[in-house]
Amino acid sequence: MDNGFRDLPSVDKLLSEARLGRLLESCPRPLVVDLVRGCLEQARRSLADGAPCPTTEELVTAVCAEAGSLMTTTLRPVINASGVILHTNLGRAPLSKETMAAMDAASRGYCNLEFELDSGRRGSRQTHVEKLLCRLTGAEAALAVNNNAAAVLLALTALAKRKEVIVSRSQAVEIGGGFRIPDVMRQSGAKLVEVGTTNCTYLKDYQEAIGPRTAALMRVHASNFKLTGFTHTVSLEELVALGKRCDLPVFDDVGSGCLLDVTRFGLEAEPTIPQSISLGANLVLSSADKLMGGPQAGIIVGDGELINRLKKHPLQRAARIDKVRLAGLIATLIHYLKGEAEAKVPIWRMISAPLTEIEERAGRWAEAIGGSARVVEGETMVGGGSLPGGTLPTWLVAVGEEGRRKPPQLARRLGQQLSAREVPVIGRISGQVLFLDPRSVLPEEDGLVIKALRESALSLGLSR
Ligand SMILES: *Cc1c(COP(=O)(O)O)cnc(C)c1O
């Protein structure tokens, strides 16, 4: 059996190579030895499959590449020119400068997270955010947790385990990534009683489902799809009135955590937390990194008695928010209190950006690409499980031509070129056209974008 196995260098021989010697200066020996063994093993498998024997040079290169990829984070900043402002795959809401500074400060050292400076006693991390949340939403009490899925799980576990929660069939939704609200609800041990039909649910459907085991009535905002045509849903007011009559609490999962009226930006009304509280919901649940524009968190506000039971539940500990995001959440909420959210919170800056400014920026982007790039009218999606079908007018930079077979890969290639860059620029490809939307990019990132576009266009020979 002589198929090159004997030609493979030994582990020691490889370790004595100069490049691996240099690698050993920055990388612990056991790790390098392990990587060398791994590469030799890989080579043996390829040899067995009939591949030629790799040279020592090739093996060393493979070891260095593997070490490099292990020691470099794969999590990288990207520029979101996709035109979806709240892009879950790109990390949802970007944060304000003040929010980032607060998170930086909290992560640098210790803080009085659960420590009362006056008395020297143990405190609660929730005290730092509860008053703010109550003031902004009009609720009696509040609690911040890891995310909204955790908020739903905690609320139902603590308040409805082994009991029934009534929800409209049209609201038993999937929120993306195969993640379904009814599955999360079921995890709590609460029995979900779905009422009505896909398109129509009436108050009497809830009424008829109420029994001795009912713990709550629940509304879930259909945050990522739209029901149109022949439909009927029960309003929160009606649900609250029914809850009062039957002595049952109403839980409202509003999803996006919106604190501003979006209709003044020409968008369709989105339920806001203060609205829901003022209409009488007993518990309102939401994310903090959707339309609230903060770091990932789940927000629960509502009746003091209910929130108290959540605070004491063991699951609260498993779902708790960490100090860094708590600091960021507080900083973001302060923007709303000061009435400066539109000017400071990035997602609101994007949503409220004037069209003329976007057109001007798109012009500069197109100029950087040159050649075939042009500025066209388009639409930005708010996205991220908020404002289904809610779009804003925008100006897009388009590269490539619809329906044209040559050059067929132009748009895609430019997209790939952009992705391979130090700070990848993510666009949207439709047909053979690459679209770049300045609305989902903060103006202060334009310098980076323009540099990336110019270099990519040059390397593809587009700019002539
Ligand atoms: C997005 C969303 C959730 C999940 O929130 P996460 O913060 O992603 O856990 C739950 N309910 C609704 C209605 C949503 O839109």
Image (tube, grey):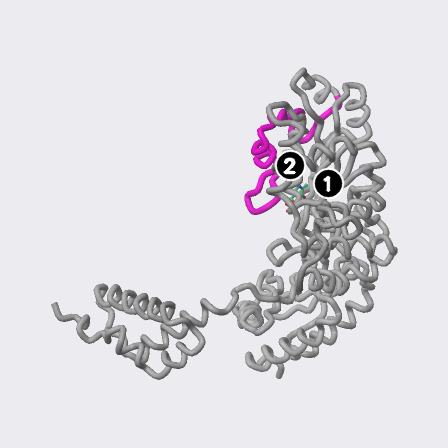
Marked residue nearer the N-terminal end (1 or 2): 2
> Residue 322: percent from the left, percent from the top?
65, 51
| Front position in the image: 430 or 100 | 100
Q: Which residue is mark 1?
A: 300
Q: Residue at x 63, y 24 (%)?
A: 193
Which quarter of the figure has residue 204? top right
Task: Please determine whether, in this image, residue 197 is positioned above or below residue 150.
Answer: above
Assess disc 2: are there few (<14), some (14-19) or many (≥20) residues with their C-alpha within 10 Å of its C-alpha: many
Span highlighted in magenta in the image: 174-203
Task: Tell me, for residue 154, which label it has, or none.
Answer: 2
Residue appearing at x 64%, y 23% in the figure: 164
Residue extending furthest toward the right:
339
Find the distance from the CA under tag 1 to the CA under tag 2: 10 Å
Q: Is residue 192 magenta?
A: yes
Residues at circles 1 and 2 in contact by the CB criterion of under 8 Å: yes
Nearer-the-camera pick, 396 or 116: 116
